[in-house]
Image (cartoon, rainbow, N blue to C red):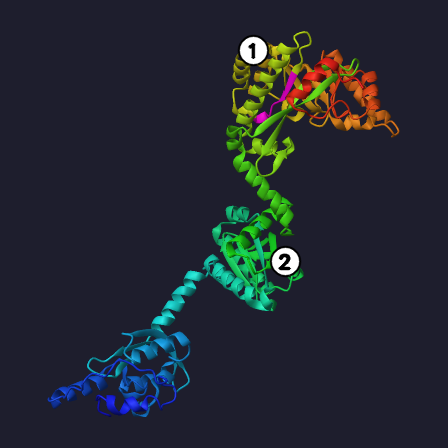
Amino acid sequence: MRPIRNQCGTNALRERAVSGTLDGQGGAPCPTPTVVTQRNESSDFRAAFNAAQLAMAVVGRDGLVRTANHALGALLGTDPARLADAPAAEFTGLREDSRTWSAYREVLLGRRERLHCTRRLKHTGGQGVWAEVIVTPLPDSCDTLLSVADISDRRDLRARLRHLRMHDPVTRLPNRSLFFERLTAALASASAARGGQGRIGVCYLDLDGFKAINDTLGHRAGDRLLGAVARRLSECAAPGGHLVARLGGDEFALLVEESEGTEQLVELADCIQDGLQRPFEVAGQRLSVSASIGVVERPAAGTHATELMQAADTTLYWAKADGKARWTLFDPERNAHRMTRQALSSTLRPAVERGEFVLQYQPLVGLGDGVVRGVEALVRWRHPQFGMLAPNRFIGLAEETGAIVPLGRWVLATACRQARRWQLAHPAEPIVVSVNVAVRQVWDSDLVSDVAAILAETGLPARLLQLELTESAVMGSAGRPLQQLRQLSDMGVAIAIDDFGTGYSNLAYLSRLPVSTLKLDGSFVRGFRSGEPPNPADETIVEALVQLAHRLGITVTAECVESAEQAERLGRIGCDTGQGWFYSRPVPADSISSLLTTGVRP
């Protein structure tokens, strides 16, 4: 064994001449050599160095090995004497990346206290060894101590634990965590590929009706089915080398890195559908399953993993909503509509409080004399982002979220307040204000109390208020809804059935409900268009409905009147009032006042 000694004098000249050393960079000056006077201490050090189980070497400032112990030789599969004068960076892999190589040189020059890294070393037998490499300066010396610890077993254990953590135990597929890890890496790689034009795709699916299998055959059978489904998905993904993962429950995803376009994703989705159509043999049962698949394919640049999977989840929902057992492509326009609905839905209630809604009014005109008999209040949303929105854009959302209750209460109060102003301004010709009421208002609020309170507050007579409910809401009413309608009628409030003829059309209910007006749906009126041959069936149906209504003491309003010919024919049949663009579009309250004086007879 070579003695361990201070070699500042001679080796300082060698470090510039040895290939792969420090390129002439100066370091901290070497300390003054210390004379070792006790030979037994030196012998003990050498003996401990050679006997240590930790692989070590002393490395000079030039990066060459001064001496190596037996453990290092055994780790590398060589005689430690053969390592003398060898560049330590070569057999430790410290030159494999520039950052580690720079840090190593800084330690050799005394500018850095320590280097700690992990490297894969090559054994002379051919197998690789994972090692923890530490380089630290030796005190009172220009040399450094290199220690190399074999961590292969520890790394293998960590890899096995990671595999268990990142894979699904039922299907043995990658799980959600590994899928998102691979997806994030694939996005970064595809963003840099093809000059930034790389693309990526995902097929996101879940099984239709899987819960029923779990409930009837048990979770063990369900797990076996999931395993069988996983194998068929892997068969579809194998030719392209695509990643298949189970994201949880009966949800799976296939990742297409470096996508070649939408057609590639569609072919993969077709393969999945075809593969799942073949029956499965599970627990002695022959099972058939299908899957709904959301397909997303897009440029990788500018796409985030979470955003991509949100789009895939939305598209999967569309596939289920469209009938299941199918794949559906992501549609940006459809998604924009969904996002708009979501934005409107979340801001409906605050919009009522902020006063973003306004009312417009459309006249109800007597078909015989052209006199305005009433107006229908129509709500509009003056949205700060989307502009003026018609009722069809938000009323359905308001009913779904329950916001229709405060909104309906505001509409009712505002319309009654305006109707009272018209009554005071035109006492000789009072007009009825008609307000639409949603079914949920009847169920989720005390409509009778609300109406009574608003009439008392505004001073509007009950006879000048008409509430409109759709035919599907009124027909078949029983219990509380019917009771509230009768209480309102007893108060003197008129009840109208809107869009009559499109719902249940159970005419027997007309004799049991407190209905005062039928509003014929516009589909009947369109059969009276000018320039088209008259449809005898339409005229016969309308005439029969009018006669039936009149015999029951119910007036009839024709909606969607667009021409003088329609108005004349409907009046001749016996309709009482008409409503439509022929008379007026919905207008602000100020525009109604002039109509009350002049009428709207053409």
Mark 2 crowd level (few <14, some 14–19, many ≥20, 10 Å Cα): many
Query: Measuring 62% from the left and 10% from the top, which residue is drawn there?
Result: 424
Q: Residue at x 71, y 18 (%)?
A: 364
Q: Which residues are magenta?
A: 433-440
SS for callout 2: helix
Residue 438 on the magenta segment: yes
Query: What residue would you read off at disc 1?
Result: 459
| Residue 79 at least partly seen | no
Q: Where 393 falls versus 57 (above or below)? A: above
Give residue 471's position: percent from left, percent from top: 67, 24
Residue extending farthest left? 38
Residue under pointer 2: 269
Question: Which quadrant would the C terminus be assigned to in this image?
Answer: top right
* Residue in the image at 61% along x and 55% along y: 295
Q: Nearer the viewer, residue 493 or 162?
A: 493
Ranked by sequence position, the earlier of labels 2 and 1 is: 2
Question: Identity of the amino acid at label 1?
Answer: Gly
Observer-nearest residue: 8 or 448?
8
Name the outermost residue toward the top: 428
Compared across the picture, whether 68 is left or right of 380 comes to: left
Residue 155 place in picture, x, y as percent: 37, 71
> Percent from the top left, x then y, of residue 152?
36, 75
On screen, residue 403 above or below 12: above
Q: Nearer the viewer, residue 361 or 44?
A: 361
Q: Closer to the camera: disc 2 or disc 1?
A: 1
- Crowding near the residue tagged with mark 1, few <14, some 14–19, many ≥20 C-alpha atoms within 10 Å: some
Q: Is residue 296 above or below residue 386?
A: below
Report whether 203 appears left or right of 27: right
